[in-house]
Image (cartoon, helix red, strand yellow):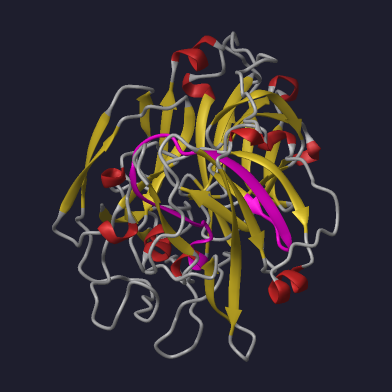
Amino acid sequence: MNEAEVKVHRDMKPTRMWTYDGTHPGPTFDTVSGQPLSVEWINNLPSEHFLPVDYTICGMKPGAQSVRNVVHVHGGRTPAASDGYPEDWYPPGQSATAHYPNGQAATTLWYHDHAMGVSRLNHYAGMMGAFLIRDEHEASLGLPNGDQEIPLIICDRCFSPEGQLYYPTSGIPGHPWISEFRGNAIMINGRLYPYLDVEPRKYRLRLVNGSNQRFLRLALSGQRPFHQIGSDQGLLASPVAMKQLLLAPAERADLIVDFSAWSHQQLTLTNDGHDVMQFRVGGKQHGDRSRMPQTLTRVPRIPESQAVRTRHLTLNDYKRPSGDAMLMLLNGTRWYAEPTEDPELGSTEIWNLVNLTEDTHPIHLHLVRFQVLDRRPIDMFMYENEKKLRYLGKAQAPQANEMGWKDVIQAYPGTVTRIIVPFDGYPGRYVWHCHIWEHAANEMMRPYVVRPRGSA
């Protein structure tokens, strides 16, 4: 981990960023399922933070170490000691070695900072990268690979007139934290308004939404079609034809785009109708033997009868008299309270996420993958006052591209979102949280404990 000057656009001065190995995004880990990997993460950052630290939020106090880091491989089935628990941070001059068994199916993961109290700033400073896992089944499908396989990490930022990162503050003396951040510029793989030269053939685009808060609504110019073949935790059962993709912070999408019908043309990737990236399609193709099979993998649905417990977990926010959000909690509980979610290793549970706020929250569970059952709107007023669920409509099935394995779920406002979670992997203390970084910081984040098999 070190500070670097990153060239984000040809017409801008280099931008001060915090990076892994001097690049943003950091190096792409290209790994194989079942082949373990050890990584020493060395903190070589400066002694002072260059973004506005709030010393009043959870895990901070006046005079506390502001430069603190720990790495989380998001979506990894990782032992607790190597998962990047927020309190396991270490300062400049120290390092930690993490062990990643990679005992999971082929998928697009990513890694990022997760240090208590400053993860939103470290992440904004540039600390993220792609982590790919491959396996024999995926290799047998003949998907586009090599130069035709492109990881794309997308995030929004604000820049000063001097080309430096600008992170806004609340304007409240001593309490600079803001509840949400939305930048006015979109970076893709560390570049503003980049372009990619492509041949008229199929490409595999592995997307990561690395934004602090922004939901991406992505499309190709002219509403040209593409197919989604994978989500957070691997391949879908079959490709899903799409013209628009909504991607929450930390969600991933594995896409196939066939440029063969658009030779000598320029296509634009847009977000909410605004241009963010250009594809320049050439006229010459060097042969395309890649395929997009109509059957990708088996994704058997988990029967609800397999769950040994159902938990009702609320998403809450609490406001100042002025109306500004000041605290966001999971199940009305602060970070430092003892864990209340304690599934047994090997068991399956249903988690009902009862969203009592006006925001959609991307909820992420460390260690595990899960399936979406349904969403159903509720009477929030009744639940707030009587703790009773009164449904206002029928249960809504997951979208077609949500039918695979997930580790981030969009929990809609005024809605119960149900997920079914097999707690496979390892015993130990993990984290579940909202992946809007500003929310997680204050303090929409909770520890949970996976108990060993047979424990009481």
Residue 66, located in which quarter of the rendered image?
bottom left
- Residue lying farthest to the left in this orientation: 93
**Range of magenta residues:** 410-439
- Whether residue 162 is visible, yes or no, is no
Residue at image point 70% right, 19% down: 260
For this view, does 351 lie left or right of residue 433? right
The mark tally for this picture is 0
Q: Residue 242 magenta-drawn? A: no
Q: Is residue 300 visible?
A: yes
Q: Nearer the viewer, residue 124 or 414?
A: 414
- Using the image, determine if residue 61 lies above or below residue 153: below
**Quadrant of res 299:** top right
Q: Position of residue 367 (x, y in %)?
A: 42, 42
Image coordinates for residue 5, horizontal then vertical, percent: 32, 56
Is residue 413 magenta-colored? yes
* Residue 38: image location, x then y, percent: 23, 34
Query: Is residue 441 shown above or below 431?
Result: below
Front-lying residue, 69 or 194: 69
Q: Is residue 363 left or right of residue 124?
A: right
Q: Is residue 388 left or right of residue 363?
A: right
